[in-house]
Amino acid sequence: MVPGPFLLCPMLFVSLFLFGSWGSAVAMAGDTMTYRYHPPESNQDQRYVYQWEILRTALEKTKAKYGPYEMKASEFMTEARQAHELKNATGKLTVMYLSTTPDFEKNLVAVHIPVDKNLGGYCIFLIRKESQERFRAVKSLEDLRRFSYGLGLGWIDVDILKSNGFKVVTGSNYEGLFEMLIGNRFDVFLRAAVEITGEYDDRKDRMPDLHIEENLVFYYPLPMYFWFPKTQEGRRLAARAEEGMRSMIKDGTYDRIFDKYQSGKITRLNLKGRTLFKIDNPFLGPETPFAEKKLWFDPSTYKAGP
């Protein structure tokens, strides 16, 4: 009787199987990992240059282990659309930079490192010049509740402010919110400390009534993370990003990039010298890394590196 092929060489079959599996793993490790991110919303939109440099540097630091990568800009999407694409793992977006929400924590994969060290939780008021005197009289949160605050439709900040008893006016267009402020549709365009100086500088000539409020800072914890699809590939993209970011924190690269982009803003805005008003963010979950103090910016202790 002639043996069947599997009886003839069982060890050869097992060896081929194992070799094929190992080869597939090597091929997967060598595949180009694609991070498709959201582009700027206008030619003047510089809000996320720092964030994408953090991600790019993290990916560079992990090339030896994970292989090549590419970062590609997606088509324009609202924040709601970005979340939809990630939740449904369509491939049109593979990484998103947004603040934490209970929905995101449930349906997406996060790298729980506040990308901007929560500097974005320190908010400065972009106002009309003639309003400055009204803000000099502010002594309490109740005083601040007398003003109206402009924010983008769908931004998590809207719900945070409303839950704390503040009046919010929303706009559906980022550039349009500046026009709404000048048009007296609300009193304050609430801007993160990481954003306001660049936004003001880019628009002050054509919007001479814009003014950065001089004395107040409004704070709530608002960790902004990199988010990924809840898929095998999404978890792999997230693991690489986190490993690179942790490496950057350990060797000081993270602080150097933070200082490069943020120290001038921190100094110019005099964050340490402003009167701080704090409100709660009721949408934070237990995964928020408050215990890792080095991940969080504090204006009272911050010193830029050499």
Image (cartoon, rainbow, N blue to C red):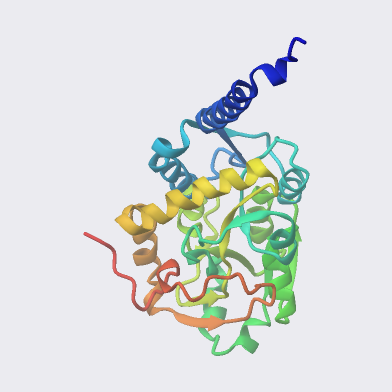
Place of residue 105 in the rendered image (x, y in percent of width and height, measured from the top left): 69, 62
Q: Is residue 212 visible?
A: yes
Q: Is residue 177 above or below residue 5?
A: below
Closer to the camera, 294 or 222?
294
Place of residue 125 in the rendered image (x, y in percent of width and height, measured from the top left): 55, 69
Closer to the camera, 199 or 79?
79
| Horizontal relation, residue 244 to residue 290: left or right | left
- Rendered residue at 34%/60% (across/down): 263
Place of residue 295 in the rendered image (x, y in percent of width and height, measured from the top left): 44, 67
Place of residue 272 in the rendered image (x, y in percent of width and height, measured from the top left): 38, 76
- Rendered residue at 49%/45% (across/down): 52
- Rendered residue at 44%/53% (across/down): 245
- Rendered residue at 57%/57% (across/down): 225
| Horizontal relation, residue 268 to residue 95: left or right | left
Which quadrant of the structure image shows residue 181? bottom right
Q: Is residue 264 visible?
A: no
Q: Residue furthest front?
A: 1
Q: Is residue 176 above or below residue 101?
A: above
Q: Quarter of the image for the C terminus: give it.
A: bottom left
